[in-house]
Amino acid sequence: MNHKEMEKKLRREARALLEQGKVGYIIGFEAGSLKFTTTPLITSDTGDISRLVVNPFIANNLSVYLAGVKGRVGIVVKGCDSRSIVSLLQDNKIAREDIVILGVPCSGLIDLGKVEELVGKERDELDDIARDGDRVVVTDNGNNSEFPIHEVLYDNCLGCEFPTPQEYDILLGEPTLPAGDRYQAVSLMKIKQLKDMPAQQRWEFWRNEFDRCIRCYACRNICPACFCQRCFVEESEPQWLLPVPRWQDNLMFQVIRNIHVAGRCTDCGGCERACPVNIPLRSLTREMYGIIAELFHYKPGMDKDTAPFLAAYEATDTEDFVR
Amino acid sequence: MPDYEPKFLALCCNWCSYAGADLAGVSRVQMPPGFRVIRVMCSSRVKPEWIIRALMSGLDGVLVLGCHPGDCHYQTGNYYARRRMAITKRFLEYMGVEPQRVQLSWVSASEGQKFAQVITEVTKDIKGIGPNRLFTDESQRNGKETAP
Amino acid sequence: MAVSDISYRPRFLAGGNVYLPHLAVIEKTVDETHDTKTLHFNFKDEKLRRDFVFESGQFCLLSVLGVGEAPFCVSSSPTRRDHLECTIRQVGRLTRALHRFGEGAEIGFRGPYGNCFPLDFLQGKNLVFVGGGIGLAPLRSLIWNVIDNRDRYGKIDIIYGARSPADLCFSYDLEAWDKDETVNIVTTVDKGDDGWTGRVGLVPMVLEEVAPSPKNSVAIVCGPPIMIRFTFPVLEKLGFTPEQMLTTLEKRMKCGIGKCGRCNIGNIYVCRDGPVFSYAQIKGFISSEY
Amino acid sequence: MIPATEKVKINKKDVAKLLGEWSGEFTVLVPSRDEGVVKWARWDGEDASFLDWYRNTIVPPKAIFLPPMEEMFGFQKDKASYRIELPVSSERKQLIFGIRPCDAKALAILDMNFSDAYEDPYYLAKRKRGVLIGLGCANPYDSCFCTSLDSSPNDATNVDVMLTDIGDEFLVEVITNQGRELVAKTSLVQVAAETDEVRAEEAKEAAYGRVARKIDTGSIKEKLLSCFEDKDYWEEVAAKCISCGICTFLCPTCYCFDISDELVKNQGERFRSWDSCAFPLYTKMPMENPRQQKWRRLRQKVCHKYGFYPINFEVIACTGCGRCIRLCPVNWDITQILGNLPTKEQLTPEKC
């Protein structure tokens, strides 16, 4: 599968959708204003269609915009994003007939942070980063260096179970096969390291991480599963926590956010990417994902006709932990 | 810490567990006195916010009590509570909170004895891990310096 | 847009740190409506009690320590200065806490902040007060101020409205002004009840009926934003120029001194440059930012 | 004393020694990495290895003077009455080593707000205790645009001492009297040769040229005010914004703050913490919110920086540090907005 071909097909399909009046808006990606970034493109103008791109940097989960756009929408999604849409459908936040899903079979996104660390330079100092099969080629000052993908893709992409969209109207390329267990260990390495620590050390770890949090709420606002009109942190009666970036309040915010999005989070990794102070938030969301899979054999965003995870039960649900 | 008496919340559902607690009291069953009962209409009324807020305020634990599965006054409330508590407990454990601090149990209106037994067990559990110092500032930090 | 003729800002700064509240003790509480109370309070500090000065139209920040702080206008007149009054409607956490307080409770007080009604400019003029609901509170301070210096001003018209007869604040003042032959007062409600014999109708409509003359007059408007928005066009229709219309605005505030950023309308900060504005000053932004 | 006209230089290897000398009198803050996040932290006393990788911090130096959270005062409750206590503040001076010209200018911009009309005691006290040692940028980011905002990668206007990289050494320029005293005290500097100054000039020019991003700030204020009421325009501009607080919290010139109280048993505190115009709660009043919609909040952000602040203080409240562009999770780029403001003819007549 080839990004350029998908891009061509995407532009063709998106233009047709707009021209035939099937959608009022297209939500996709265009090249960003910085090297190796993309930015959401929300447009109703066919003139903008040629700006749509598909490449290994289409990081944002665009389903976060669905609630804010009125009318029928065409939206570009990767595997994880499509599950967010299914999750929103389960919660009745959007109507299926209002969206046309343009599915990108995804082969993983390149983690610029990892590239920077490997090369020892920041992204704007590099000439090119390109995906070539199972390798990523980084060009710096005319010199190429190659890295295997498990060193440069995002952790969540390495462990991705469903790279091809689960729900789509138009698929832009051949379905991608999941990597299976090949990169699972790398994907879950950070979580494993944490689980191997004694409880107190783990608490200390999180406390130190959340000491850095500035409470910008980017993790919450970038998240399609966080769709509350009024977040619990904004409640004043009762006031659950202070609007002050103390580690106690920061940590509590994140714990409760994770419980709230349990069963909705599809491990898209958006929160961790958005965090300006590098808090490993995916180590939280992925663990919750794992707990739900282990205890309830539930995978979020797979079936739009079932009830949301926390709004359903089985009489046979686990009782092991009950005193 | 021989004299340490854990303080924890017992969030009792109105229809079963609260009556069970009442029965335990009326029958003068002996149990440790460190718990405080808050009556809620149903165990599914308990939000994760409450549990974490309670731990943040320094309580040593939170015990949620509801009707036995199948006996919920609202038919299914305790099933939802069970799911929610399962993930809350496991997740907090992953964060580094001792699992003994967050517990769920079923106590019916006629189970005064069981209420006392659960309270005794939870008290013992928490005694085993000691007072809640999770959210206090003084305990050992990584020696990291931030800008003053 | 420079802050024009009403920029006089009396300041009272006791001590260095402007963020430190002075402690005050509630002396009395008066129930105005089912959700509105007037607190009568005085400073704990003897010296402050003696030296404190303010002007009609200024506001203060009251706090219940441990709950929070919010801006309120001083609703008593500087001419009657044995204590201070603030009128508070219960709408949230802080106001609920303030409502719970009775005689003897301690509150924090910061202020007075902001500018005040331009008394020099008002002297010798006919005054038209247009108030809605709890918006009478800041006007009340000025009305008593004017009545206590009655010979300096011309005619006084008060047009005051509330949602229902039970929502009319300061009933004791309304009565007193009604008896005062030098004051013309019209009260109106949006919806009357069995005992109500007065006017029924929205404030802007009643204002149009009463039709005070713009000649040598100044209109002073305060009420909910929606009322303010609809009152200005009526005044314009009656012939008032934007300079002849004053209002006092309310915004969410934290610092009260122009630092925390949130109370701006364009480049104007309601706390620092206001809360009293002439319509001429805010005309450009009011449709979209208030 | 070094004469005012004379320039000196210091070898890069001696920087750590110099910081060591200064640590006696000052708390020395340098850029440091905390899990990959570059921020200001107390110098570890070992080396000056940050010089090898430091470009700019993620958390701007405003955090030193206006911390993300600080205690304003504490209070003790005794039945119905209270006792208010000010927190003990340190008298020790702080030396910020390596502040970039954009961030130093940002502090000068913050000073205007915090000393206008009423003085802000918390900010100004810290500011008076601070000494700024500027470090010119040799390698600006692709998101930097300081040259469009009356500044440059080597602008020495707002620091006490300015350093310019000239290879193995830094050229040391003394800007203020305080800076002169500092430099005079140390024996680690040598008198700079004329060639050093030439090299410094060359370095400055080269750095200036490396700032590729440019905007025309000429009549931005007027343009913004004329399109202020154009709802359609602002809705379009705000469409992809997710209303998080990154661009405002990490902006070196954003100063908005929130005040909140906490009371535990009988001991309470009042905190002040960063707040952002991106949040709906920021302007929310009990009955209504003048900026409930996202586009209104975003409009406030842009217009405050480039419209209202210039009206009030005659300076644009942006220094072109580029943090908001680099760190935005959706790459919302303010320079693109400012570069494409609608002209009068393009405005939609329909108002908001």
Image (cartoon, coloured by chain):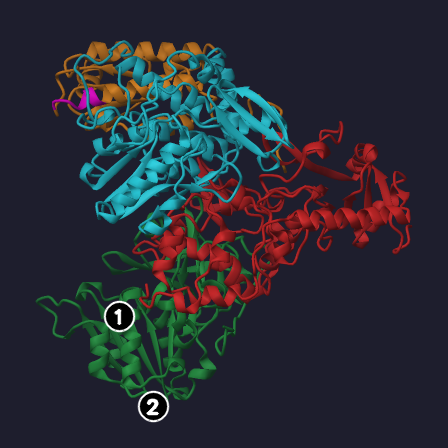
- Secondary structure predominantly adopted by residues drawn in magenta: helix
Which label sits in the foreground, 1 or 2? 2
Residue occupied by mark 1: C172
Chain letter, red: D
Residue B79 lies in the magenta-colored region: yes
For the residue carrying disc 1, how many other residues have a C-alpha within 10 Å: few (<14), some (14-19), or many (20+)?
A: few
Expressed as whole percent of the image width and height from the top left, the position of residue D327 reads 51, 40
Expressed as whole percent of the image width and height from the top left, the position of residue B18 reads 20, 22
Q: Residue at x 26, y 70 (%)?
A: C172
Chain letter, green: C
Query: Along the line of sight, which residue is nearer the eye, A257 or A49?
Result: A49
Query: Along the line of sight, which residue is nearer the eye, B148 or D88?
Result: B148
Q: Is B31 rendered above or below residue A48?
A: above
Is there any visible trace of residue D19 in the rendered image?
yes
User: What is chain B's hue in the picture?
Assistant: orange
Residue occupied by mark 2: C215
Badge 1 amino acid: Tyr
User: Which disc number belongs to residue A52?
Assistant: none
Expressed as whole percent of the image width and height from the top left, the position of residue D130 reads 70, 47
Badge 2 amino acid: Lys
Numbered disc 2: what chain?
Answer: C
Residue A5 lies in the magenta-colored region: no
**Quarter of the figure with the C terminus of chain D:** bottom left
Expressed as whole percent of the image width and height from the top left, the position of residue D346 reads 39, 65
* Residue D47 image-quadrant placement: top right
Q: Residue at x 24, y 19 (%)?
A: B82
- Label 1 to label 2: alpha-carbon separation: 31 Å
Chain letter, cyan: A
Query: Along the line of sight, which residue is nearer the eye, A284 or B95?
Result: A284
Magenta range is B75-80
* Apparent side of residue D58 relative to residue A31 in the rendered image (left or right): right
